[in-house]
């Protein structure tokens, strides 16, 4: 991991105070406040359209916050987005890979953008065990294989903060186990995970956030929440 | 925020100046030797074209302000200026066609570079509204519209240069020598015509701005009162949340 | 600069693995010559007509290219992937303009010989080729710059296939005017004549102004 600048170590990984993001006049996120210590995991629950993906994209610097303060890895967004970029890894529904290129070509492209050496590409390719298929174009892959490549892409530059949007949706149990050391709790990274699975999500998280219509409906340490409370969000 | 303060004064001034200008043009300016009475349309056509082009460039300048500051009011100003200039542009092309028919016997004259350039500029700005309309997210819409407006604003003079170069012009003496050896009896109504047209533009501009703003204020008040949100349809016009 | 090269290499790799744009543009331009032949009912063209056909065909092939320039990035998440990297965002615009420029050069290797064989009346000598290369290079710069800018503008709209050509076409009229006027003496019936410098000067000015403008404005088309 890239050494953190002095003073950043102690700062919480994520600090939100009144974060608001609008689409036109409609608020996709409204007045969301929370603090996540470095190394901890935040699970975000909520029905479709509740603002989970918007939250992840704001944290990834892809969307500008419209109001409130947003500090990620000690830097304020959107002002210091450049300092955050390159230190977060985003794994969303979209693999962010070119379908006509092979995993190796895709990852080499990302490695150059992030200033990472080619040996790291081989390292992560080994880790997701694509075997002999690392030079086949991606459009010949199953969804699970694509997702494994996407995991490799997300952690290629060894990000301090991982943003995972239902990361295991397309993975079979064996593949989920395979990527566990890369994106699981053992990876030692700060994580924000969006999930639809109350029990599994709560087991994985330190802090749980429930969003309904862009507003905070629930915010508590994951250990203190009953899965039934999560189920209630969807009603 | 209100834009309506000077609206009444500007409207009256526009009406007065235009009346004087057209009055002078009709009754005092000599009938042009070559073209006869039809040349009178010059006092409408040319001021309108000049004001429309200035409106396009003004829209570009407001767009630069918008991109620099990110303030929605500049996008609104840019939108209104361009929108009005397109409307004036229709007038310019219509009066131009009438004049061309009377002077040269054709509805459009390709050897007339000013008219040709104006047509190209007009065609470009006609895409402004569809461009806005096809972007749903209002913030993105205004940002993209501003990028367009800046590009198109720079395009206006460059395009004129290219078109003018392409053809040796045959334009009627009056127009190209405006200010030069334009007879005095032509000059006064011509300048007054420009002034009046600019005032008219300014009045319409203020009117539309204040209309858009009061609608935004109304919407906000309604939301505060009832909480019941009025459904806002997809729109090409900037949505201002006034404060 | 390194970012630009990385992006450019990716574009060329994509086009080499799955050739799409260059063959399409080349094929389109040859077909357009055939269409011109029948529409104008002429076997041999020279001068004004030849210059016009060549420039207009190149323009339409470019419009085809502009429409596809960003499609892979939009549909396969290339924009987001790029925006997540700690690099200068304008690099994407520069890389796209260079990509389009490279594609246009490749297309011209097919298009110009096809034009000479199918439509062009006068003989072809080195002097003609030299002047043609000069003008086409300047035209390509203008087309690439506008293409990179308008393509990025159009790709985020709902009606991108409509907005792209609609905006690009009037914006490129000055390129057509100056290039056609510069080329018509070069393609004259009695061998290449002298070019009039003023058209090249305005074309150069156009390239410069819109190059700088696109460079300054491109960032605003990426932010969300």
Image (tube, coloured by chain):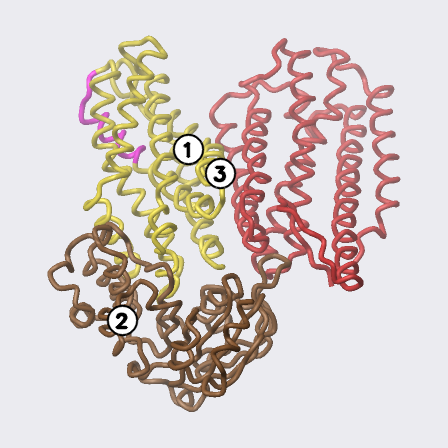
Q: Height in image: A89 above or below C137?
A: below
Chain yellow in the figure, letter: C
Q: Nearer the viewer, residue A199 or B218?
A: A199
Q: Which residues are magenta?
A: C123-136
Q: Position of residue B130 (x, y in %)?
A: 56, 38
How many dots with numbers?
A: 3
User: Secondary structure under badge 2?
Assistant: helix
In the figure, the shade used to draw chain B is: red
Q: Hey, which residue is sitting farthest front in the picture?
A: A228
Q: Chain of mark 2?
A: A
Q: Is residue B232 left or right of residue A161?
A: right
In space, the residues marked 1 and 2 are separated at their CA atoms by 56 Å
B234 magenta-colored: no
Q: Which residue position is annotated with label 2? A: A176
Numbered mark located on residue C15 in the image: none
The residue at 41%/29% (across/down) is C176
Asked if badges 3 and 1 are on one and the same chain, I answer yes
Q: Where, quadrant-wise, is the C terminus of chain B in this rendering?
A: bottom right
Q: Height in image: B41 above or below C20?
A: above
Numbered mark located on residue C163 in the image: 3
Chain brown in the figure, letter: A
Q: Does the rendering let one see residue B121?
A: yes
Q: Is residue A170 left or right of residue A105?
A: right
In space, the residues marked 3 and 2 are separated at their CA atoms by 43 Å
Q: Position of residue B171 (x, y in %)?
A: 61, 20
User: Secondary structure under badge 3?
Assistant: helix
Q: Which residue position is annotated with label 1? A: C175
Q: Chain of mark 3?
A: C
- Neighbor class of circle 3 (other Cα within 10 Å; few <14, some 14-19, many 20+) is many
Q: Does the rendering let one see residue A82?
A: no
Q: Nearer the viewer, mark 3 or mark 2?
A: 2
Q: Position of residue B153 (x, y in %)?
A: 56, 43
């Amino acid at each position: 991991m890239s050494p953190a600048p002095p003073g950043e170590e102690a700062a919480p990984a994520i600090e939100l105070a009144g974060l608001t993001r609008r689409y036109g006049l409609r608020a996709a996120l409204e007045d969301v406040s929370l603090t996540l210590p470095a190394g901890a995991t935040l699970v975000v629950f909520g029905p479709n359209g509740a603002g989970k993906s918007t939250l992840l994209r704001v944290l990834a610097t892809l969307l500008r916050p419209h109001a409130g303060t947003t500090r990620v890895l000690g830097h304020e967004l959107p002002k210091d987005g450049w300092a955050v970029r390159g230190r977060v890894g985003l794994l969303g529904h979209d693999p962010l890979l070119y379908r006509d290129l092979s995993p190796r070509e895709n990852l080499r492209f990302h490695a150059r953008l992030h200033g990472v050496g080619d040996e790291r590409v081989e390292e992560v390719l080994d880790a997701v065990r694509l075997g002999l298929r690392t030079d086949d174009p991606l459009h010949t892959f199953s969804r699970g294989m694509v997702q494994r490549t996407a995991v490799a892409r997300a952690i290629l530059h060894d990000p301090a903060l991982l943003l995972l949007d239902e990361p295991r949706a397309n993975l079979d149990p064996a593949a989920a186990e395979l990527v566990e050391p890369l994106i699981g709790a053992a990876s030692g990274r700060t994580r924000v995970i969006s999930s639809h699975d109350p029990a599994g999500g709560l087991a994985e998280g330190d802090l749980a956030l429930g969003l309904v219509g862009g507003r905070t409906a629930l915010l508590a340490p994951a250990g203190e929440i009953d899965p039934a409370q999560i189920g209630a969000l969807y009603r | 925020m209100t834009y309506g303060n000077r609206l009444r004064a500007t409207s009256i001034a526009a009406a007065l100046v235009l009346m004087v200008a057209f009055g002078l043009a009709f009754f005092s300016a000599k009938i042009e030797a070559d073209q006869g009475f039809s040349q009178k349309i010059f006092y409408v056509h040319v001021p309108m074209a000049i004001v429309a082009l200035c409106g396009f460039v003004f829209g570009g300048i407001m767009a630069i302000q918008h991109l620099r500051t990110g303030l929605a009011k500049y996008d609104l100003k840019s939108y209104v200026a361009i929108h009005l200039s397109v409307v004036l542009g229709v007038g310019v092309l219509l009066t131009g066609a009438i004049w061309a028919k009377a002077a040269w016997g054709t509805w459009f004259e390709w050897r007339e570079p000013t008219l040709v350039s104006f047509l190209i500029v007009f065609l470009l700005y006609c895409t402004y509204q569809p461009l806005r309309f096809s972007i749903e997210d209002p913030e993105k819409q205004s940002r993209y519209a501003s990028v367009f407006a800046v590009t198109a604003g720079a395009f206006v003079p460059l395009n004129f240069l290219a078109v003018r170069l392409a053809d040796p012009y045959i334009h009627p003496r009056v127009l190209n020598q405006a200010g030069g050896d334009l007879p005095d009896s032509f000059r006064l109504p011509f300048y007054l015509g420009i002034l009046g047209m600019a005032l008219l533009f300014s009045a319409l501009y203020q009117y539309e701005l204040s209309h858009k703003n009061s609608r935004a204020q109304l919407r906000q008040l309604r939301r505060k009162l009832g909480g019941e949100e009025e459904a806002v349809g997809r729109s090409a016009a900037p949505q201002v949340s006034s404060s | 600069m390194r970012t630009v090269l990385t992006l450019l290499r990716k574009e060329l790799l994509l086009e080499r693995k799955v050739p799409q744009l260059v063959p399409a543009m080349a094929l389109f331009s040859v077909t357009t010559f055939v269409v011109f032949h029948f529409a104008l009912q002429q076997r041999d063209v020279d001068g004004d007509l030849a210059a016009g056909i060549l420039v207009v065909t190149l323009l339409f092939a470019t419009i085809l290219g502009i429409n596809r320039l960003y499609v892979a990035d939009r549909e396969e998440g290339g924009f987001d992937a790029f925006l997540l990297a700690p690099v200068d965002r304008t690099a994407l615009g520069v890389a796209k303009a260079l990509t389009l420029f490279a594609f246009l050069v490749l297309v011209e290797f097919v298009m110009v010989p096809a034009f000479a064989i199918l439509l062009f009346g006068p003989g072809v000598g080195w002097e003609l080729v030299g002047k043609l290369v000069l003008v086409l290079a300047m035209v390509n710069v203008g087309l690439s710059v506008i293409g990179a800018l308008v393509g990025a503008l159009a790709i985020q709209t709902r009606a991108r296939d409509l907005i792209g050509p609609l905006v690009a076409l009037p914006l490129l009229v000055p390129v057509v005017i100056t290039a056609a006027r510069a080329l018509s003496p070069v393609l004259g019936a009695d061998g290449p004549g002298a070019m009039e410098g003023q058209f090249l000067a305005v074309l150069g000015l156009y390239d410069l102004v819109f190059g700088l403008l696109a460079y300054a404005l491109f960032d605003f088309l990426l932010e969300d």
